[in-house]
Image (cartoon, rainbow, N blue to C red):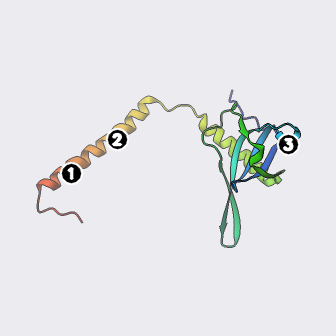
């Protein structure tokens, strides 16, 4: 049975002091407690603005690399947050799609070692052929490559 990613925690959007905007799941929110402690978040995605032809496009990219395991929790220092809000329904929908696709890509069955060896042999064969061509070029002084 295929394991599914858990996207049941509340999803929040944060503007950070670095200027970055992220969207993430909030496991535990530091703003709900008077004591200082970091927020606990999962699957943070950076929101990137890409204006094109007077239209604003947005994309989501992983905020931290390779932290999409199911059990990975990340701390977010409350002093690094300028503001926060509930993201739009459209952003939440896209966020969930991206999280699921990243999780699925990271949890694909491993490639068969024999297939990897075959691909590596193709590369080695190509490199060897290029070396032999280069050797012939060095020997044949009439051959010029432009």
Identify which residue is drawn at 65% across, 47% down. Answer: 63
User: As drawn, which residue projects farthest toward the bottom?
Assistant: 54
Q: Sort mark 1 into few (<14), some (14-19) or many (20+) by Cα contacts within 10 Å.
A: few
Residue 42 spot, x, y in % from top left? 73, 38
Quarter residue 30 falls in: top right
Helix, strand, or loop for circle 1? helix
Q: Who is closer to the viewer here, 140 or 68?
A: 68
Closest to the camera, between mark 2 and mark 3, is 3
- The residue under label 2 is 122
Q: Is residue 79 left or right of residue 67?
A: right
Residue 13 locus on image (x, y percent): 78, 50
Upstream in sequence: badge 2 or badge 1: 2
Local packing at callout 2 (Cα closer than 10 Å; few below 14, some 14-19, many 20+) is: few
* Residue 25 marker: none
Q: Mark 1 and mark 3: span between their CA atoms?
A: 66 Å
Q: Farthest residue to the top: give it.
A: 1
129 left or right of 100? Answer: left
Image quadrant for the N terminus? top right
Residue of label 1: 133
2 or 3: tag closer to the N-terminus: 3
Residue nearest the observer in this picture, 128 or 36: 36
State the CA–CA distance, disc 2 to disc 1. Answer: 17 Å
Q: Quadrant of residue 10?
A: top right
Mark 3 residue element = helix
Mark 2 in CB contact with mark 3 (< 8 angstroms): no
């Amino acid at each position: 049975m295929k394991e599914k990613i858990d996207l049941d925690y509340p999803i929040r959007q944060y503007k950070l002091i670095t200027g970055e905007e992220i969207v993430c799941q909030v496991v535990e929110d530091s703003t709900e407690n008077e004591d200082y402690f970091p927020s606990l978040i999962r699957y943070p995605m950076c929101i990137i603005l890409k204006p094109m032809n007077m239209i604003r496009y947005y994309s989501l990219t992983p905020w931290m690399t390779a932290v999409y395991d199911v059990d990975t929790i990340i701390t977010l220092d409350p002093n690094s947050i300028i503001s926060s809000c509930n993201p739009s329904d459209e952003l939440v929908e896209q966020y969930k799609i991206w999280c699921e696709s990243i999780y699925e890509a990271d949890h694909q069955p491993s490639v068969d070692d024999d297939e990897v060896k075959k691909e590596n042999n193709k590369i080695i064969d190509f490199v060897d052929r290029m070396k032999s061509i280069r050797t012939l070029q060095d020997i044949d002084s009439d051959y010029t490559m432009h």
